[in-house]
Amino acid sequence: MVSNDASPYPFCLPDALSPPEEWAALRDSEPVAEVRLPSGDQALLLTRYEDVRRVLSDPRFTRHPDAEDAARVTVNEGGGVFGEKLTEDELHQRWRQVVSRAFTPKRVRALQPGIEKMAESLVTAMIERGAPADLLRELGFPLPRWVICDQLGVPDADRDRFAHWSDTMLAMTRFTQAEIDAAQTEFAAYFAAHIAAKRAAPGDDLISEFIRFTDEFGGRLPEEILVGTSQGLLVAGYETTAGMIGKMIALLLAEPQRWAQLRADPGLVRTTVEEALRFDANPGFGVPRYLSADIEVAGRTLPAGSMVVCSLGAANRDERAFADAGRMDLRRAPNSHLTFGIGPHVCIGQALARVELHAVLRVLLRKLPTLELAEPPSKLSIREGLVVGGLERVLVRW
């Protein structure tokens, strides 16, 4: 039973680039903390690296619980990212195997030249429009939107419609249930029509490929799985990567010696991306898990029926797992951060996200080596009300 004085969660950040003070305190003294979710329901928060890794790796625990006693993350569960209902486990895991084929290292590597070319085109246009410029608006959002829409075979003319639909799926407090319902009805109808068109005239895109793969299931998969997969890939491939581009550049420019170090040694792009992913102090809500069985964590038995929230950001700052964890080290290696999760629900699109982040750094280093923030880091503001972290804007000059 969780006490009535459980701390409200998510925690407030002291500024856009710094972690909440609660992370370190909880890791040290209360690694299983009682928290109150935006819905008013209560859950248990995990902040240590090994504890988070253990729970996420356990295939018994589901992300989107349908048990009647499961805590709700938000009041507006319907249509949101936490309101999805899983198919039965075997079908879900088989479908993940199918989707994973679309993001094999070989396929993702083949996309790299096109992604870098698009990044260069966007940066060139930004330079032509002049400084100061909002790097998020000019590059952070357009690049991943172009990438994932291109992969899904979505027409160029339709791409501007996805920002609102995506935000409603990721909302905790930003929209009413009526607004979420209306947006998601439009979103689902759009992809149902798009999938029907691809069935009639397949192309060289992910949706056409998913349709071809369904013969492994004895025929067509339920339409809602194809629609949900398309929606999920667009949201994950667009919003989260866009947010990470903005946060990564802000972290590097907030302390100019970081950008100077990378500029002096562009060979650090790969380790810099991994360290930005680890060091991100604003990764969003975290990963919920419904415990379908008792489990012992940090010397405490967590009973079946509990809702646990795994704080990936807190785990990534754990000194037990990372030496000098509170310092951004562009040379850190190895770097076994948990930003993309681990276990049966690990992020399928992580290789694609990495390619986009690498491309952004390479292009900016090449075309804008004198890049700097156009306003003090203290002026950076957080995007509020969504389950993913991000910044409102990143003003830069050169």
Image: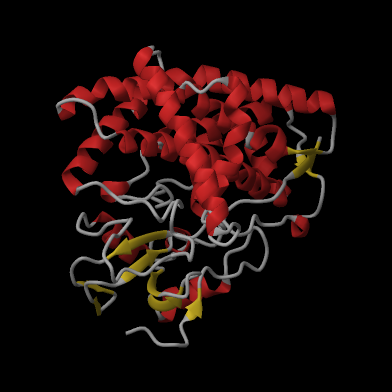
What's the coloring here?
secondary structure
For the point 48% across and 59% down, the residue is 313
Label total for image: 0
Q: Is residue 361 visible?
A: no
Q: Is residue 66 visible?
A: yes
Is 372 placed left or right of 14 in the picture?
A: right
Closest to the observer, 342 or 60: 60
For the point 39% across and 52% down, the residue is 338
Q: Position of residue 246 (x, y in %)?
A: 64, 44
Q: Position of residue 344 (x, y in %)?
A: 26, 48
Closest to the observer, 105 or 81: 81
Q: Quadrant of residue 398?
A: top right
> In the picture shown, does residue 27 fall above or below 378?
below
Q: Residue furthest bottom?
A: 4
Q: Position of residue 222 (x, y in %)?
A: 26, 35
Is 296 placed left or right of 5 in the picture?
A: left
The image quadrant where one finds the N terminus is bottom left
> In the picture shown, does residue 210 fall above or below 93?
above
Q: Quadrant of residue 382?
A: bottom right
Q: Position of residue 389 (x, y in %)?
A: 56, 54
Closest to the observer, 367 or 256: 367
Q: Residue furthest left?
A: 218
For the point 40% across and 78% down, the residue is 33
For the point 46% across and 23% down, the residue is 151
Closest to the observer, 113 or 152: 152
